[in-house]
Amino acid sequence: MDRQTVTRTESPQASTRIEERPRRTLRGEVSLSAVVAGFVAVAISYAGPLLVVLQAARAGGLSADLTSSWVWAISVGSGVACILGSLVTRQPVMIAWSIPGAAVLMAMLGSYTLNEAIGAYIVCGALSALLGATGLIGRLLAMVPRPITQAVLAGVLLPFGITVAGAVVSAPVVAGGIVVGYLIGRRFLPRYAVFGAMALGAVLAAATGTSGTFAVHPGITVPMLLVPHFTLGSILGIGLPLFIVTQAGQNAPGLIVMRASGFEPNDRLLLTGSGIVSIVFAFFGAHALNLAAVTAAIATSGESHPDKRRRYVAGVSTGVFYVLGGFLATMIVGLFAAIPPAMLTALAGVALLVPAQNALHGTMQEGATAPG
């Protein structure tokens, strides 16, 4: 009887202790390394994938205002999706614009009016949301053995590491300095190795005079609301190809990266959500938003934060930087045009070095089923 009495008196206390346990808050879990990971991811996106968008806009004959609206839409749309997705799932959710989709538009955009293209973008977003809601992509990936998914990830990341050698040859001081700075940082301050390499590269670029002219035009980018025009031709010529390359070339690799990093993404939530966000921002020029792969490897890696539970902060910080970049689109384009290409190549390579090593290691491990 006494033992039963003690048990009854301890149970409310245990319940009280559980209720009084402090909840995880974003403010308490912010770290410099996660914020830097987000900044590096956005910098790489603007310096590389954004150029494909700008080339597609030029091929389509878009005006400067329409091009700025397009950049605003993909930036702010990606940012909103990153922030909401990361906060809801407490995982580093990385959403960005479709790079292969922009490549498709380089060839097709000039054949249709912009209003027809907007209609095709909306159809693509709707199809993406519907496919995401079925969970089909997640089920297919769950059938793939883990070593194969790791090999796919390694294949995505390795080219970035290989191109660092060419960058060092073309710009030995700047690119070489970034590599040396990163290696030293990994030895003494591993969490801030990428940040140190980036800062050193900026100093060396300024000291050697290799940075370009900063053609920055101050001002806030104002988006343009565009009216869609739905035609069978634009849907078949733009919408369907855009949908196919986005799912195969972006969403599937994006899920693979998250799973390879030890996360269990809710594919239905993320893919459906990115499709809905794509529809909303298509009215301002966004062609397609999807899960990112390369930048996700940065945010989900241990260099973002040793504690996997706190890496979602990198997704939130990425979203914040995207939103800021969207409203400063014209300034961002001019700013990154001044950064030496070799510096960005080297920076991307060192930022993805550890994820690539982990992926290569994963390809050698036994495993008959996919993670999770």
Image (cartoon, rainbow, N blue to C red):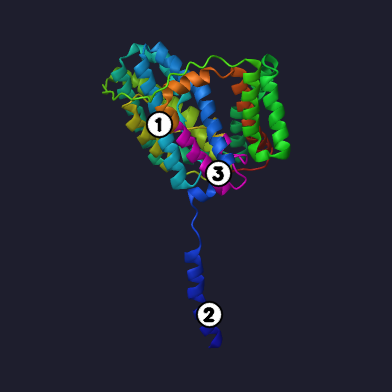
Majority secondary structure in the magenta region: helix
Q: Name the one closer to the observer, 64 or 165.
A: 64
Whichever of callouts 2 and 1 sits on the residue coming sooner in the sequence is 2
Residue 318 falls within the magenta-colored stretch: yes
Q: Which residues are magenta?
A: 298-322
Left or right side of 86 for 261: right
Residue matched to label 3:
311
Left or right side of 339 for 229: left
Whichever of callouts 3 and 2 sits on the residue coming sooner in the sequence is 2
Give how far apart the Cα atoms at labels 1 and 3 are.
Answer: 21 Å
- Residue type of the residue flagged with mark 3: Arg
Q: Residue furthest bottom?
A: 1
Identify the secondary structure beneath mark 3: loop
Q: Could you classify mark 2 by the number of other residues whose Cα lies within 10 Å: few (under 14), some (14-19), or many (20 or more)?
A: few
Res 356 visible: no
Q: Could you classify mark 1 by the number of other residues whose Cα lies within 10 Å: few (under 14), some (14-19), or many (20 or more)?
A: many
Q: Residue at x 63, y 38 (%)?
A: 147
Identify the secondary structure beneath mark 2: helix
Q: Quadrant of residue 240?
A: top left
Residue matched to label 2:
7
Residue matched to label 1:
76
Number of marks drawn: 3
Q: Is residue 134 above or below residue 105?
A: below
Q: Position of residue 281 (x, y in %)?
A: 35, 30
Whichever of callouts 1 and 3 sits on the residue coming sooner in the sequence is 1
Q: Position of residue 83 (x, y in %)?
A: 44, 40
Q: Given this view, does label 2 or label 1 mark the residue nearer the observer?
A: 1
Q: Name the one closer to the observer, 280 or 310.
A: 310
- Residue type of the residue flagged with mark 2: Thr
